[in-house]
Structures are given as C-alpha cells and as structure tokens.
Amino acid sequence: MPTKRRVPKDRKPKITPEAVALFRLGLEIIEAGDDELWEEEGGRRREYLDADKRLCWVLLGLAPSEASPLDVQPGQKYYGAECWLESVPKALELRALLQKGKTS
C-alpha cells in the first residue's frame, strides 16, 4: 500500500530582532542577580521568566523540556534529565547566534 510522504517542517529557529532583545534582557537580569528574586523581594524574576518563556517557546520553538539559551554556558558540565541534557548543544548553538545578534 502506498504511503504519503510528509514534507518535513522547517524546524530551524529564526533569530529575530525580538529574540535578540529578549535574550539580552534575560542576560541583563541574570548579571544583576535579579533572576532569583521575585519582584516583592526587589528582584525581577517574573520579568525574567516571561522573557525566557516568550524567547524559548514562542520565538525559538523550543519545548518546555529543552534547555534555554539563557540556562547554558560554553564549557560547563550539566546534570539533569536526559531530554534536557540532549538539548544543551542546541541551546549552546542558539546562544552563540543570539550573542552575535545576527537575524535570519
């Protein structure tokens, strides 16, 4: 019986100016140490989580179980769930593209 071959979707994330801006905002919040404290405690955790969620889930199309480009650093060792660990190389690649600020 013949089968219909499905054309694969383009799964390559698009690096847009909005994605670069959200990535930079996330880095700014992390560098200030405000990503761990909620707004009531003087931090910016809600702002960070909202930016990270929009960047990863909406703009880059990452699954909630995948590593965020904001979560990873080159040269570090990571521990965690297998599916998260498998996504670290992709997150590092996206991080490098976002740091360059090149849009596609």
Image (cartoon, rainbow, N blue to C red):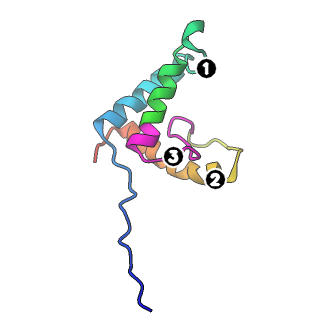
Image depth: mark 3 or mark 1 in front: 1
User: Please, what is the three-letter code of the amino acid marked with disc 1?
Assistant: Glu
Q: Secondary structure at mark 1?
A: loop
Q: Secondary structure at mark 3?
A: helix
How busy is the neighbourhood of tag 2: few (under 14 within 10 Å), some, or many (20 plus)?
few
Residue 70, image x, y percentages: 51, 35
Q: CA distance from mark 2 to mark 3?
A: 12 Å
Which residue shows up at 40% across the image and 37% down it? 99
Q: Earlier in the sequence, mark 3 or mark 1?
A: 1
Residue 73, image x, y percentages: 56, 38
Q: Which residue is mark 2?
A: 83
**Residue at the far bottom in the pictured view:** 1
Residue 30 drawn above or below residue 70: above
User: Please, what is the three-letter code of the amino acid marked with disc 3?
Assistant: Ala
Residue 92, image x, y percentages: 51, 46
Q: Main secondary structure of the magenta part?
A: loop
Which residue shows up at 51% across the image and 27% down it? 49
Residue 25 drawn above or below residue 102: above
Q: Which residue is mark 1?
A: 36
- Determine which quarter of the picture holds residue 19: top left
Q: Which residue is mark 3?
A: 91
Is 45 included in the stretch rendered in magenta? no
Q: CA distance from mark 1 to mark 2?
A: 24 Å
Magenta region:
55-72
Q: Earlier in the sequence, mark 2 or mark 3?
A: 2
Q: Are marks 1 and 2 in contact (CB under 8 Å)?
A: no
